[in-house]
């Protein structure tokens, strides 16, 4: 089994990129992207796919649509932030 070496600089860069992603997703443009993507997934599910798989796809599309409409980011808790992309207070 090969050894894996972790470079701290690489980890910091990846963390920084993730924080930048969450920062983008909580911005006005990111919010609009979530709404448009969610609406597109719903339309594709209902109009293009149809049937039971289309309904499932439409329900999945409601998640990013609702996230954009109600201004929360489901990815933020994965990076130590609250649902609105703010850093959690240290307890």
Image: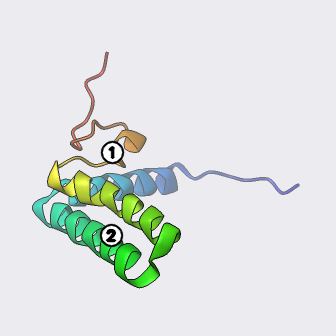
| Along the line of sight, the residue nearer the viewer: 12 or 51 | 51
Residue of label 2: 42
Residue 18 point in image, percent of width and height: 37, 55
Residue 70 visible in the snapshot: yes
The colour scheme used to paint the residues is rainbow
Residue sitting farthest toward the bottom:
48
Q: Determine the residue positioned at 88% across, 55% down.
A: 1
| Quadrant housing the C terminus | top left
Residue sitting farthest toward the front:
51
SS at circle 1: helix
| Along the line of sight, the residue nearer the viewer: 76 or 50 | 50
Q: Determine the residue positioned at 25% across, 64% down.
A: 34
User: Label 2 neighbourhood size at 10 Å, few (<14), some (14-19), many (20+)?
Assistant: many
Q: Earlier in the sequence, mark 1 or mark 2?
A: 2
| Along the line of sight, the residue nearer the viewer: 90 or 47 | 47
- In this rendering, is residue 78 above or below 9? above
Residue 13, which numbered label? none
Residue of label 1: 76
């Amino acid at each position: 089994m090969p050894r894996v070496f972790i470079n701290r600089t690489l980890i910091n860069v990846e963390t920084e990129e993730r924080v930048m992603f969450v920062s983008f997703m909580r911005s006005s443009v990111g919010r609009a992207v979530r709404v448009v993507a969610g609406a597109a997934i719903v339309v594709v599910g209902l109009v293009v796919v149809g049937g039971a798989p289309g309904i499932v796809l439409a329900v999945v599309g409601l998640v990013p649509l609702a996230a954009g409409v109600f201004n929360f980011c489901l990815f933020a808790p994965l990076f130590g932030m609250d649902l609105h992309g703010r850093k959690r207070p240290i307890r």
